[in-house]
Image: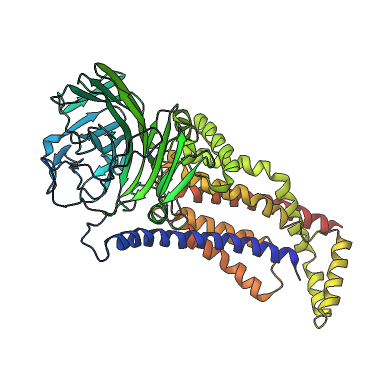
């Protein structure tokens, strides 16, 4: 048996199986979204997860809290879990920069808009919730330079909002959402480095609350402070909560994905036992999470982007995930109780992040938040590869060129290992006629055939494993690079040359996938043909199969494979010619 060829085919088939598995995961992920909504709405008059609830309003103004947490943390007072009370909602028209009312919700003048260099934010005065975030530095579509990418939104297509407030014994959001006032409906950062937006609430008893949003230049972090002034005659006690509410609709990222990979969509947090703990929407439905942690964060994650609450790092908070009866996925925190005596002031705060998964920025915001850039179990290989890629880009200024140079450097590192493999293949090709004679001579005796093969290997100083093992050693690096390129938001809408203006999506003319398939075909011609007819047929079809897979791969990934194949083919050709020439002279 040709051990070398069998192992090589096994390695390639393993890679093919991995690609097929990712495609199956892609399909299952889409089915999961549908099944989650179906289970929640089947047999009941509950609104679908991708529409705003339209329940009957209750209370004086219909602005009662929906899906707010219960403050069950040591040293605090519990609040009622008002899971089924209707939610306030506003549709924000990003194209026209206006707001329009949705049936059974607050009027459009309850929305204020904030503009910074990085963020375009809509805040609902009913609760002071962030109901839209558009990222000014990222386009929704590369062909539309006027429309920014919208991460958070609240309309008939998607519900994805960030909520925060004060609950507990005296919380202003415990019985109904606080109705704030603002001196303006529009705030612009202009040339300032910071922008402060104050929302004001007060009651007749002498209690006033200022909900302050602080925006910073060149930042996706928003500081959210609650300044409580208790001029009443009684002690005030309440808890800060922050949560992200999202339906189960698929994320729109404007890049990446394809047949090769379905990026994770769901919630994540950090715990003392697990630095990065993920929760798919289906898992949130089946197994609600609740745990206390000092510091920490909780986030909603999708391909390239995330939103996250980061409360006070010095306090112990209760983090939780769940799915409401109306089909919304909730991930949030509740902080310890704050007690303010009459005549005193107090303050509680948290930070909110809405932006790209830039790991170097995220690691400065909170420990382990950078792990939301998920490289999988080979992160320890992918992380230095990404560091090297960014250093190369800093020099060349083009991500496509950086990928090419990174591929060359990786190939240089494995040059001798690859040379060993190619020498083994070349020697196997050189003795192919002798191997054919042995198979013909001992066609009816497999044991003697194997013994004769081993004697030939020993005589010709050939290691039948030498051609396969070096390739297997390199496979973890190739897989890690695959995940690294898929997860890098830096490649989103990044141009290369000519027709490739976005490395995160497939090649529109399939030039790179066809080049990859052609390079695989010519590489096969440099290798000895498999002795087994079935193996030979499999090898002949592999370039076609891989080309089909790679048609939908992001151009950045295919570029890596093309360059790697061309370098491998050149190295293999030179080594094969050297060995054949040396054999001819001998």
Residue under the point 81% across and 59% down: 463
x then y, percent, for residue 356: 39, 37
Q: Position of residue 33 (x, y in %)?
A: 35, 58
In the displayed structure, does residue 469 sit left or right of residue 487? right
Q: Is residue 69 left or right of residue 88?
A: right
Horizontal relation, residue 539 to residue 169: left or right: right
Residue at the spot x=41%, y=58% of the render? 29
Height in image: 106 above or below 547? above
Rendering coords of residue 353 (x, y %)? 36, 33
Relative depth, front residue between 558 and 77 = 77
Image quadrant assignment for residue 576:
bottom right
Q: Is residue 582 above or below residue 501?
A: below
Q: Is residue 230 visible?
A: yes
Q: Is residue 571 left or right of residue 498?
A: right
Query: Which quarter of the image is occupied by the N terminus?
Result: bottom right
Name the quadrant containing residue 152: top left
Q: Residue furthest front?
A: 234
Residue 426 sits in which quadrant?
Answer: bottom right
Residue at left offset 33%, top offset 27%:
338
- Which of the image's four quarters has the C terminus? bottom right
Q: How many marks?
A: 0
């Amino acid at each position: 048996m040709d051990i070398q060829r069998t192992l090589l085919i096994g390695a390639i088939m393993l890679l093919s199986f991995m690609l097929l598995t990712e495609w199956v995961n892609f399909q299952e992920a889409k089915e999961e979204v549908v099944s989650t909504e179906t289970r929640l709405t089947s047999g009941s008059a509950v609104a679908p997860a991708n529409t705003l609830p339209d329940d009957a309003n209750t209370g004086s103004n219909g602005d009662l809290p929906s899906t707010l947490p219960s403050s069950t943390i040591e040293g605090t007072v519990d609040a009622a879990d008002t899971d089924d009370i209707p939610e306030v909602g506003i549709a924000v028209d990003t194209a026209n920069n206006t707001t329009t009312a949705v049936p059974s919700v607050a009027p459009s003048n309850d929305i204020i808009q904030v503009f910074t260099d990085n963020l375009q934010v809509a805040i609902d005065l009913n609760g002071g919730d962030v109901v839209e975030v558009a990222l000014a530095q990222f386009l929704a579509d590369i062909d539309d330079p006027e429309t920014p990418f919208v991460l958070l939104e609240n309309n008939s297509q998607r519900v994805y909002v960030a909520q925060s407030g004060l609950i507990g014994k005296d919380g202003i959001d415990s019985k109904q959402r606080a109705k704030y006032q603002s001196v303006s409906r529009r705030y612009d950062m202009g040339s300032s480095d910071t922008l402060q937006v104050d929302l004001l609430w007060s009651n007749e008893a002498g209690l006033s609350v200022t909900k302050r949003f602080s925006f910073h230049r060149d930042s996706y972090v928003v500081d959210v402070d609650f300044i409580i002034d208790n001029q009443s005659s009684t002690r005030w006690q309440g808890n800060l909560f922050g949560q992200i509410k999202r339906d189960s609709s698929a994320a729109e990222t404007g890049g990446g994905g394809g047949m090769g990979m379905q990026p994770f969509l769901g919630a994540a947090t950090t715990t003392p036992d697990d630095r990065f703990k993920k929760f798919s929407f289906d898992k949130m439905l089946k197994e609600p999470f609740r745990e206390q942690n000092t510091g920490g964060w909780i986030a909603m994650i999708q391909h390239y982007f995330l939103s996250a609450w980061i409360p006070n790092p010095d306090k112990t908070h209760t983090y939780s995930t769940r799915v409401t009866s109306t089909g919304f996925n909730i991930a949030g925190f509740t902080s310890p109780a704050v007690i303010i005596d009459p005549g005193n002031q107090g303050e509680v705060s948290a930070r909110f992040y809405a932006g790209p998964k830039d790991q170097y920025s995220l690691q400065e915001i909170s420990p382990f938040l950078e792990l939301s850039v998920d490289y999988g179990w080979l992160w320890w290989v992918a992380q230095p590869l990404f560091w090297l890629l960014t250093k190369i880009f800093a020099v060349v200024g083009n991500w496509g060129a950086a990928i090419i140079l990174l591929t060359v450097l990786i190939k240089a590192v494995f040059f001798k290992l690859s040379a060993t493999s190619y020498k083994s293949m070349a020697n196997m090709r050189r003795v192919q006629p002798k191997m054919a004679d042995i198979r013909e001579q001992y066609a009816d005796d497999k044991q003697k055939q194997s013994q004769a093969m081993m004697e030939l290997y020993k005589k010709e100083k050939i290691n039948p494993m030498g051609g396969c093992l070096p390739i297997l050693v390199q496979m973890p690096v190739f897989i890690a690079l695959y995940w690294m390129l898929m997860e890098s938001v830096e490649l989103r809408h990044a141009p290369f040359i000519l027709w490739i203006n976005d490395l995160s999506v497939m090649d529109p003319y399939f030039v790179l996938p066809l080049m990859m398939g052609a390079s695989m075909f010519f590489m096969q011609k440099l290798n000895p043909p498999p002795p087994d007819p079935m193996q030979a047929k499999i090898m002949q079809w592999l370039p076609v199969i891989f080309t089909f897979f790679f048609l939908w791969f992001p151009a950045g990934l295919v570029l890596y494979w093309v360059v790697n194949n061309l370098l491998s083919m050149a190295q293999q050709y030179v080594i094969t010619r050297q060995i054949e020439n040396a054999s001819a002279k001998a």
